[in-house]
Image: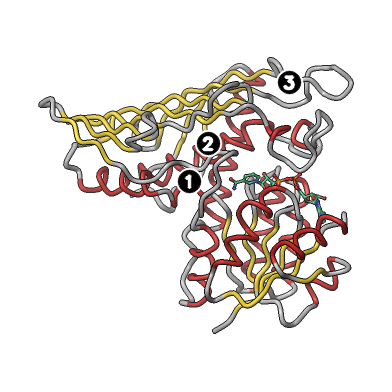
Amino acid sequence: MKIKAGIIGCGSITRYRHAPEYQANPFVSGIVFYDRNMDRAQILAEEFGGSVAASMEDLINDPTIDVISDCSSNEYHHINSVKALLGGKHVLCEKPISLSLAGAEQILQAQQTSKKKLMVDHNQRFTKAHQKAKQLIESKELGEVLTFKTSFGHAGPELWGINKTKSTWFFSKERSGLGVAGDLGIHKIDLLHYLLSDEIHQVSAFQGALDKKSATGEPIQVCDNLVCTVKTAKGRLGTASFSWTYYGEEDNSTIIYLSKGIIKIYHDNEHQLIVLNKDGETVKYQLEAIQTNDNQTNSRVIDAFISSIINNQEPPVTGEDALVSLKVILAILESAEKETVVNINTNLSKVK
Ligand SMILES: NC(=O)c1ccc[n+]([C@@H]2O[C@H](COP(=O)([O-])OP(=O)(O)OC[C@H]3O[C@@H](n4cnc5c(N)ncnc54)[C@H](O)[C@@H]3O)[C@@H](O)[C@H]2O)c1
């Protein structure tokens, strides 16, 4: 079986992950690029040996295309992914699935109507260290998870996106919507749900635009930092920090404290997973370095998406998973705005 891919949006995530990973996947026969900035599509088509669609309609109506990656900016996901699903394509939508619950629900509805696969790019689940940590937690050899802390921060999206200036859409309220919470925070919420087989049910948070300035010199319209405390459905307690102002070094670390020991993930550059047990024994695992903005490795997301199509299986990160994480992020932002604890009703389908 051969699969042809279309990509909407030819910026950084397409250049560094979607295009090279489709190109490397043995089941993918070709890539068609579309961007409303045609030059960007043309450049990637030349670089990765694909072709260019002249319009979104041409891309979606092309009967040779089986799957579409929606790599447009956040405010368009609910428009582009819905069009692609209803046009009969399997869709890999970038995160956050949408800026609003209504937008996310439109995408889920389109998936149900079309019966096509929908996956959302929460790539943290696919790293070897996170998968090993999940396996250790599920084995219960370190007992029960009690508390946790997680961070995700780098020096800012104006160093990553294709527009490397202060006028980047990542700083705009209408376009990025959720600031660092929707950009980096939502990855860690999805990771916590995945690692703990649990869901976050209560949050309290503080946020601010502490350092980033817009092109006009004003503080940006969205948060560049957010810190929060969370409580899960199973009663676990944790803290999380998300930042666009970690200048000098990225932080992508998580620590899980269990009743018989500790799991440290991405705390040590050489040993991506370190396990300390109650009796003083330490086991260090060398797995693989985490992806950073400067060091891109295969995220395994495209391979997982293609595999779910070939084997006709549910994708490993569903629209429902992404919707639940979006609910938590919206609650975190609401908590920061109202300066109060916010409860989340997530309809616990997956919590056992
Ligand atoms: N999964 C991850 O780890 C990860 C990492 C970075 C970005 N992202 C997500 O990927 C998406 C794209 O981010 P990026 O960093 O590539 O941004 P970017 O600014 O580098 O590129 C976005 C591209 O999309 C194009 N575009 C926007 N709206 C469009 C539309 N309606 N039709 C056609 N083209 C359109 C723009 O012209 C631009 O070329 C965002 O949703 C972002 O949150 C995910």
* 3D distance between C-alphas at marks 3 and 2: 30 Å
Determine which quarter of the picture holds residue 327: top right
- Any atom of ligand 1 within 8 Å of the CB at mark 2? no
Q: For mark 2, what is the residue? A: 344
> How many residues crowd around disc 3 within 10 Å: few (fewer than 14), some, or many (20 or more)?
many
Q: For mark 3, what is the residue? A: 212
* 3D distance between C-alphas at marks 3 and 1: 26 Å
- On screen, residue 323 versus residue 200, left or right, reads right
Determine which quarter of the picture holds residue 335: top right
Between circles 3 and 2, the one closer to the viewer is: 3
Q: Amino acid at mark 3?
A: Lys
Q: Amino acid at mark 1?
A: Gln
Q: For mark 1, what is the residue? A: 124
Of the numbered discs 1 and 2, the one sitting upstream in the chain is 1
Secondary structure under tag 2 reads loop
Residue at the front extreme of this rendering: 47
Of the numbered discs 3 and 2, the one sitting upstream in the chain is 3
- Any atom of ligand 1 within 8 Å of the CB at mark 1? no
Residue at the image position 35 percent from the left and 35 percent from the top: 270
The label number, if any, that marks residue 30 in the structure image: none
